[in-house]
Amino acid sequence: MYVPRSRLFWSVGLGHFTNDVFMSMGVVLLTFMSVSLLPMSNAQIGFAVSCTQLLGALSQPFFGLRADRDGGRWLGAGGLAWVATMALGALLMAVVTRNYWLMFVPFVLTGLGSGAVHPVGALQAAASAEKQRVASNMAFFFLMGQLGLALGPTLVGVLLDLANTHWLTPYQVGVGMNALPPVLPNVTPVFFLGFMALPAVLMMATTIPRRRSAQKAQDKGFDWASLPYKALVILAVMVLTRGIASPGSINFLPALFQSKGWTPAHYGMITSAFWLTSAFSGVLLGYMADRFGRRAVVGWSMLACAPAFFLLPSVDGAPAFVLVMLAGALSGSPTLLVVIAQDLIPAGKGFASGAMLGFIFGTGALGSLFIGTLADNIGLSASFQWVAVLAAVSAVLTMFLPNKRA
């Protein structure tokens, strides 16, 4: 099986992993702060997370344009250092000031650093690929990010638990949200996570080329008038309909199975199963795309996932796990969408990467809003069946895109 061997690839892959560790631990930190350092409502937590994601999504195309000009060495390395600094800075502000808005500013600014890391990493992961292995390289790049997303919450949660074994908040014994703990929690171990970012920052700063000589055409930028706008519009609509299926639907899996009487542990496990199968299937889909074409693999996988979404509300127990894993594995790897965007804009791959990643994140948020609104009107089970219909529509739209194997 093909595995990337380029030092350049592994520098940006490690950077992607480290970035997503810090980004995914944010929700756990906010929850911990809200019961120990800085009382927050669910709305305040959600507002901080949404603003962070939005800033990251909107900034990526602009950072991608910059990376097209110089390769993004300092943009990528600096962006990763910024993510770690702002994430830990938000925790420090909570400890020192116990003021929501002073914590809010550095927390949201982590999105800016993440917006820099992703297009640089995607650009260089593709540039470092062996001949006819671009999709495979991109699949491994996104696998590294998914592993970081999975590790971050667990890592910070374990550190906080170990450091506060004998500590009990007054909120746990019913004192109320306006009281402060008699003994402040120990968050010191979390600050040592800053050292975790150093190897990736140094590798990116010393490995990413200042200028990608293999793509000299990009040194002059690209002609906006020559862009394939028809194909880009089809791609945008396809990504929008796909975003409702994945990642939009993932936020409602816990609610769907909670309504069936599942415990938090069980519907947490089935949600994790979706993400893990999505991560590892991306490698296989990337390999297949290098052999059979990006368009065909994305289209057929989206079409195959539609029955899994449609049947999901009707099953329970072990069959539900099987269908969720199939839905996660087949619901169109974001890896291939980025590669398709790079194919359509070959003279601006950094911009293409940033724009597509930002659009994927944004459509996921719109997908969640759509499903939530639809569920309030027709029920969650019927909403998942509409997700299946839209997944099939996305598959049909894919067939109108240009096909390419390498």
Image: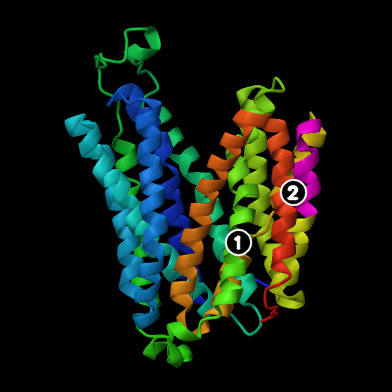
Judge left or right: residue 291 versus residue 222.
right
Judge left or right: residue 356 versus residue 64.
right
Q: Nearer the viewer, residue 305 or 158?
A: 305
Q: Is residue 384 above or below residue 350?
A: above
Res. 168 in view = yes
Q: Is residue 311 above or below residue 209?
A: above
Judge left or right: residue 282 versus residue 56.
right
Residue range (magenta): 304-314
Magenta stretch: includes residue 309 = yes
Residue at the image point whose x is 74% and y is 47% from the top: 388
- Image quadrant where one finds the C terminus: bottom right
Q: Which residue is mark 1?
A: 237
Three-letter residue code for mark 1: Val
Which label was assigned to residue 226?
Answer: none
Res. 202 in view = no
Magenta stretch: includes residue 398 = no
Residue 297 spot, x, y in % from top left: 74, 67
Q: Is tag 1's residue or tag 2's residue first in the polypeptide sequence? A: 1
Residue at the image point whose x is 39% and y is 59% from the top: 58
Query: Which residue is outermost to the left?
Result: 97
Residue 181 spot, x, y in % from top left: 27, 16
Total count of labels? 2
Q: Nearer the viewer, residue 222 or 49?
A: 222
Q: Which residue is mark 2?
A: 389
Query: To which quarter of the image does residue 342 belong?
Result: bottom right
Three-letter residue code for mark 2: Val
Q: CA distance from mark 1 to mark 2?
A: 14 Å
Residue at the image point whose x is 34% and y is 58% from the top: 113
Residue 357 spot, x, y in % from top left: 50, 62
Q: Main secondary structure of the magenta part?
A: helix
Residue at the image point whose x is 44% and y is 82% from the top: 224
